[in-house]
Amino acid sequence: MPLVDRMRPFTSTIFAEMSALAVAHDAINLGQGFPDTDGPASMLAAAVDAINGGDNQYPPGIGVPSLRHAVAEHERDFYGFDLAPDTQVLVTVGATEAISGALLGLVEPGREVVMIEPYYDSYAACVALAGGVRRTVPLVPDGDGFVLDRDALADAFGPNTAAVLVNSPHNPTGTVLSDDDLAEIARLTVEHDVVAITDEVYEHLLFDGREQHPLALLPGMTERTLRISSAAKTFSCTGWKVGWITGPAELVAAARAAKQFLSYVGSGPFQPAVAHALRTEMGWAAQNAAELQRKRTVLAEALASVGFEVHRSEAGYFVCADPRPLGYADGDQFCRELPARVGVAAVPVSAFVDDKESWRHLVRFAFCKRDDVIADAAARLRRL
Ligand SMILES: *Cc1c(COP(=O)(O)O)cnc(C)c1O
């Protein structure tokens, strides 16, 4: 096989496998997390205007000024950060490139990156691309939710740690890390004098009155944290691939050094449209979060009524459920059979972990779908 060793564990993604099964069985795909309705109309119109207005060549390497300024204003208005738009904001090709740029720019080969398990699939692949080593810290059940395993967290930090990569709100569990867990991460990050990279793409999709508390706001963290977000989830435009990194100028510059040789730039006409949305459509985003909260409840109740043990989803696009009460001990096998059995696709949480045994039972369902689609999926799941 010609593929380099460090990429061998990453040849296929679970989404491709489950989406293929969904197509083969004409199943409703609750596997992959993308919305099936559009973002705010004025944002779509702004993109059309940008294309018709000639914004079709390479944008500046760090992103168009209107978007960098809009991001800086957003960071100030929501969290009180004071950022220079020319040196402390970097526009990227989605949060995905922000993550890869940050890791490639900040992690020397052989150094370790601490991350929460389960982890977003690109984290492991990007750490491997950087020649780094991942150190996972599991979430553990706490009532119907999850908290960090504090002992494992402390053990994961050491002399070889380069960075900690924190995803909250968390995909796939929908956990919003508690202030206590965030404080403990901050304490260890400062103590070991390492960098934090935070993936906060679900920052505007919190439920039940919860609020986003960026790790970068904790004592000692502002000067060592790169904060990543994206228009994809906030404005339901996952295909636009407009993301950003904010933080101290020297850390942003490190991510930028790698980023400029990944894509160089991207999403030219979408950047001014996202700037427009950040400035004028945060009300839409709040409304969208309220609708997702309702959809979360509908799907969670449907799963519970069928007999799943359902975990609490506090934010984002996903709810995790345990099919063991239905007689399935293995989530992977369950997901492979589900499209043919009832016409619904989901993904096993074991796809996002190293410790397969501990997570074998859990299955992730997406609820970022139209009401009729969720109702149809719920009706199909009742056949179980
Ligand atoms: C969707 C998602 C991303 C990717 O965001 P893009 O802007 O589409 O690249 C990154 N991290 C997490 C946790 C996500 O769920």
Image: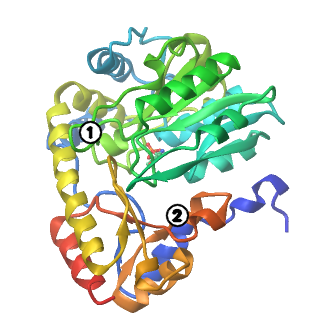
> Measured from the top left, where is residue 344 in percent x and y?
36, 80
Left or right: where does residue 307 sit relative to residue 364? left
Name the foreground residue: 241 vs 21. Answer: 21
Q: Quadrant of the N terminus?
A: bottom right
Q: Which kind of residue does numbered mark 1 sit on?
A: Ala
Name which residue lies at 67% across and 29% down.
163
> Measured from the top left, where is residue 201 in percent x and y?
40, 39
Q: Which mark is residue 110?
A: none
Displayed quadrant of residue 108: top right
Q: Is residue 137 visible?
A: yes
Q: Which mark is residue 349?
A: 2
Name which residue lies at 37% across and 27% down.
213
Q: Is residue 281 visible?
A: no
Vertical comparison of 339 with 90: above or below: below
Q: For the residue carrying disc 2, how many other residues have a C-alpha within 10 Å: few (<14), some (14-19), or many (20+)?
A: many
The colour scheme applied to this rendered structure is: rainbow
Query: Dots 2 and 1: beta carbons under 8 Å?
Result: no
Q: Which kind of residue does numbered mark 2 sit on?
A: Val
Name which residue lies at 37% across and 60% down.
311
> Measured from the top left, where is residue 189 in percent x and y?
63, 22
The answer to whether mark 2 is within 8 Å of ligand 1 is: no
The answer to whether mark 1 is within 8 Å of ligand 1 is: no
> Measured from the top left, where is residue 316 in percent x and y?
34, 48
Name which residue lies at 67% across and 60% down.
355
Left or right: where does residue 154 sit relative to residue 232? right
Q: Secondary structure at mark 2?
A: helix
Task: Name the residue that disc number 1 marks.
Answer: 47
Displayed quadrant of residue 369: bottom left
Q: Secondary structure at mark 1?
A: helix
The CA span between labels 2 and 1 is 36 Å
Name the foreground residue: 136 vs 205. Answer: 136
Name the foreground residue: 169 vs 312. Answer: 312
